[in-house]
Image (tube, rainbow, N blue to C red):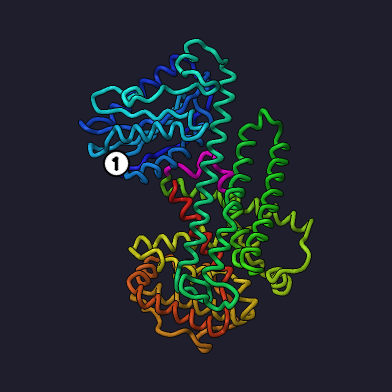
Amino acid sequence: MQKAKWREEDSLFAAVALPDVLEARDRRAAKRSDLLSEAGYCLLSVSLLMPGPIKTSKLSRAFLREYCAYLRKQLRGQNLLPVREEALVDPAGDAYFFLFTSGTDPLFLKKLLISMEEEYDWSRVLDLDLYLYGSDPVSRVRLQQPERRCLICSEEAHACSRSQKHSTGDLQEIVRQFQTDGLLQLLCSRMQAAALSAAVSELLVAPKPGLVTGSDAGSHDDMDRFSYADSIAALAGYFQTAARCGLQVALFRDSAPEQGSEEDCYMEFHKRLAELKQEGLKAERRMLAATGGVNTHKGFIYLSGLVLAAAASLSMDPLPLAASLDVEDETGLIEGWQQQISRWALALQDIHNLYPQPGETAGESIRRRYGISGVRGEAAGGIGSVFQLGLPFYRGLKERAMAENEAAAVTLLLILAATEDTTLIKRAGLQEAERIRQGLAEFFHTMAQTGGQCPGQLPDDSTVDKQAAVNKEQLAADALSPPCLDNIARGETAVISYISLWSDYFREKTYSAGGAADLLAICLLVLKLLADI
């Protein structure tokens, strides 16, 4: 299927005159004619009701883009698979098109669209029109369905429009509210689903050194797959709230001329930041209640909250998380995403410093003793171990036809080699943790050589320089090189056996790499959010 390209362009979202509106109508008609050029095909057009002279806004564009992502999944769920998608970005009215072949039953599709137009109060601002080749649009009357109702009252929409029963201002107000409600519901639900899926996916990945999987408890005697399932279920509402915190910042910023100054935007950010912190603490308590006091997801709660809030705060920017992106676009999006993650993380750290929690966590103790920043340092730096290392590495393996489980298992090794995992340091000690990281870095260096073969045993002390720190730049260069990716994919069976050796070693020593597991889950979350684009 050909997927649409949707850019913000240079639209000023200004008022448009009637001639411009009529020209835009002609452009949409021409686009429909161009797409609907074969007999038997049908075309779904998605547009918005926008009363008044302003036909496109940042809010309307973000809402329409998010709705199309939602609609795409709904269509797929009904086995309605478009062969082409295309967007028409227009200051006089945006539109999105889904093209279907002759194998699609247009009446079945139209019935689905009618139900979706009435699915929520806010969905009434959508126009989901179905066009057939060589004929008029499929109407509600043809299916003996009632005409659409007014956005404000219960009368027929056409009757209210003809009589001008409601003022333009009242209609604009209700449309903006409906678009806001729809965007909040769709985006926050989508991001929550991605976070839950990522948490479950991380659990299922195997083998993982010392970590709980779907088949064993690793090095742990206080948690297993069932306690993990209970923990994930307890966190469900948190992910949606984290996304909502970020989106509220974006919505306030969009309405800043009405709401006040830049200082007001700053205050709104800190209001939502405090809310995110409190919701994170409540999520931790729910996790502990579900697991009987065992920490299964504390790191993921912290990191996922930042990732989701930061992503949602960009939802109305020029590169939002529901547009079709090329490589250049995605690079820009990720750069902005990391900047926002860093912003939220540093601001949260300021709050933590002002109002520290009683007692000292294991991570804080390690930070004080060794100067290792751990998960907070990762977050403050924009989680580079995921965006610049784990993400491209995982994708490189998938491009070489490696299965999701195996690609994720090797990605975990890379993340463990690249980061100072405070969970591992707590259990193994700093020197042993560094020895393990050096051994993993040597594995990726070996695999980066032409014809590199996977080792059949773990490194011993004689092959590891215990005094040397892992060179992260060299590690990244090795792991992301085509020979390394090729050799790992080609030797998949041997590589998974090698990871199993590490799993046996960690289990024997009761080591665990919980920090790396959290980062793997974040990597899977980022992948799922980008896949929604």
Q: Residues within 10 Å of mark 1 (few under 14, many from 20)?
A: few
Residue situated furthest left in the rendering: 39
Could you say whether the residue bearing mark 1 is in a helix, strand or loop? loop
Residue situated furthest front in the rendering: 144
Disc tally is 1
Image quarter of the N terminus: top left
For residue 376, above or below residue 18: below
In this view, the residue in front, 310 or 159, is: 159
Residue 29 among those drawn in magenta: no
Residue 88 appears in the picture as rendered: no
Residue 378 appears in the picture as rendered: yes
Residue visible at 56% across and 64% down in the picture = 518
Residue visible at 50% across and 51% down in the picture = 193
For residue 530, above or below residue 410: above
Query: What percent of the width, then of the height, locates residue 397?
Result: 38, 64
Residue visible at 69% across and 48% down in the picture = 275
Query: What percent of the width, then of the height, locates residue 437?
Result: 54, 76
Q: Residue 300's image quarter?
A: bottom right
Which span is picked out in magenta?
A: 310-324
For residue 523, above or below residue 432: above
Residue situated furthest bottom in the rendering: 462
Query: What percent of the width, then of the height, locates residue 420?
Result: 60, 71
Q: Which amino acid does label 1 sit on?
A: Val
Residue visible at 60% across and 64% down in the picture = 297
The residue that disc 1 covers is 83
Residue 314 among those drawn in magenta: yes
Query: What percent of the width, then of the height, locates residue 203?
Result: 50, 66
Chief SS of the magenta region: loop
